[in-house]
Amino acid sequence: MRKVREVLRLKFDAGLSVRKIAASLQISSGSAGNYLHRFNACGLTWPTPMSDAELERLLFPPAPAVPSDQRPIPDWAWVHTELRRPGVTLALLWQEYRLSHPQGFQYSWFCEHYRLWAAKVDVAMRQEHRAGEKLFVDYAGQTVPVIDRQTGEIRQAQVFVAVLGASSYTFAEATWSQTLPDWLGSHARCLAFLGAAPQILVPDNLRSGVSKAHRYEPDINPSYRDLAEHYGIAVVPARARKPKDKAKVEVGVQVVERWILAALRNRQFFALGELNTAIALLLDRLNHKPFKKLPGSRRSAFEAIDQPALQALPEQPYVYAEWKKVRVHIDYHVEVDGHFYSVPYQLVKHSSKYA
């Protein structure tokens, strides 16, 4: 029950200001002022013989019934998709909704019911991913056996997985190892697959990507940093023991294992290229597979949301380089892989990194 009568009594009998009335009744100044404005607009005089219930019904009449065709329920799936675009907010989407439907629902109702709908999409806490912002990368836990035709030796191929945050568009390929050359090569091929680059790379704390894990200032591998600089990307590793930082790629890995690796479990492969051809076919099918709870697919979401926000790739492809810390000898030479290179003599006994 609103404290209408008390507001009127304190105003007209006690002569208090709106601010003092609000403080006395522990309501907002806006509410107290609103009650007084409505009372004056009705042409009533104080004191009034009306009961509290009659007074409230007069000052706050029920809203007129609006036909359902003039007050349609918003398309929450479309709202959810639009929120991933840069700069789009619930306030903006509500304003556009009211422009199309002037008798539509109010902003508070709009926000409340969207959040109720979004909570049903995924009971776990959801991260909001902006268009073109983050690319999550990791390796699948499963490996794929590849048989050498000559010797019959079986090697286990690693599976690299990358997922864009906003659209969940997925890339996957097999490599022989998780070492630095394969790690960086997979990144370059992934960006070529996307045809553009995101703003941020989010790797796990794999040794090839992160030299030293740290909660706030992790050390990025110099070669990995070199790749990031080449593409104009920031590297922000997932924090150690914080699985929600990389939840997107963990789900992506699970999807790749279920829809690609499981489908290949009974096939034999005799070359890495043969395996990657099979993965590429299933990957295309995965990206075109319709979402269960949202409209479209990973591919359509990528084209509509992520692709327009991604940044262009540089004209020249990334050239792999390894960095090594060396010390300048007294003959002002440094040794790299058994070869000696001269440097300025002023650097004698100093250490530096060379690619």
Image: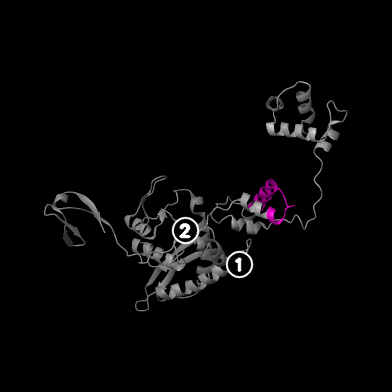
Residue ID at (52%, 64%)? 169
Query: Which element is circle 1 on?
Result: loop
What main secondary structure does the magenta stretch of the protein show? helix
Specify whether residue 193 is in view: yes
Q: Residues within 10 Å of mark 1 (few under 14, many from 20)?
A: some
In 3D space, how far apart are the residues under numbered discs 2 and 1 (Cα atoms)? 21 Å
**Magenta residue check for 111:** yes
138 to 219, vertically: above or below? below
Residue pointed to by mark 1: 290
Magenta residues, start to end:
98-118
14 to 126, vertically: above or below? above
Residue 243 image offset from top left, x and y in percent: 49, 51
Residue ID at (32%, 64%)? 320
Residue 62 image offset from top left, x and y in percent: 81, 43
Specify whether residue 208 is in view: no
Q: Considering depth in this image, is 336 or 196 the residue closer to the camera?
A: 196
The amino acid type found where label 1 is placed reads Pro
Residue pointed to by mark 2: 135
State left or right for residue 77 relative to residue 61. Answer: left
Are the residues at dot 2 and dot 1 in contact (C-beta closer than 8 Å)? no
Instruction: State the scheme by which the image is colored.
Output: one colour
Q: Considering depth in this image, is 67 or 242 the residue closer to the camera?
A: 67
Q: Considering depth in this image, is 260 or 325 the residue closer to the camera?
A: 325
Residue ID at (58%, 66%)? 297
**Magenta residue check for 50:** no
Residue farthest right in this picture: 49
Residue 122 image offset from top left, x and y in percent: 61, 54
102 to 144, vertically: above or below? above
The amino acid type found where label 2 is placed reads Leu
Q: Where the N terminus falls, by quadrant?
A: top right
327 to 147, vertically: above or below? above
Query: Which element is circle 2 on?
Result: strand
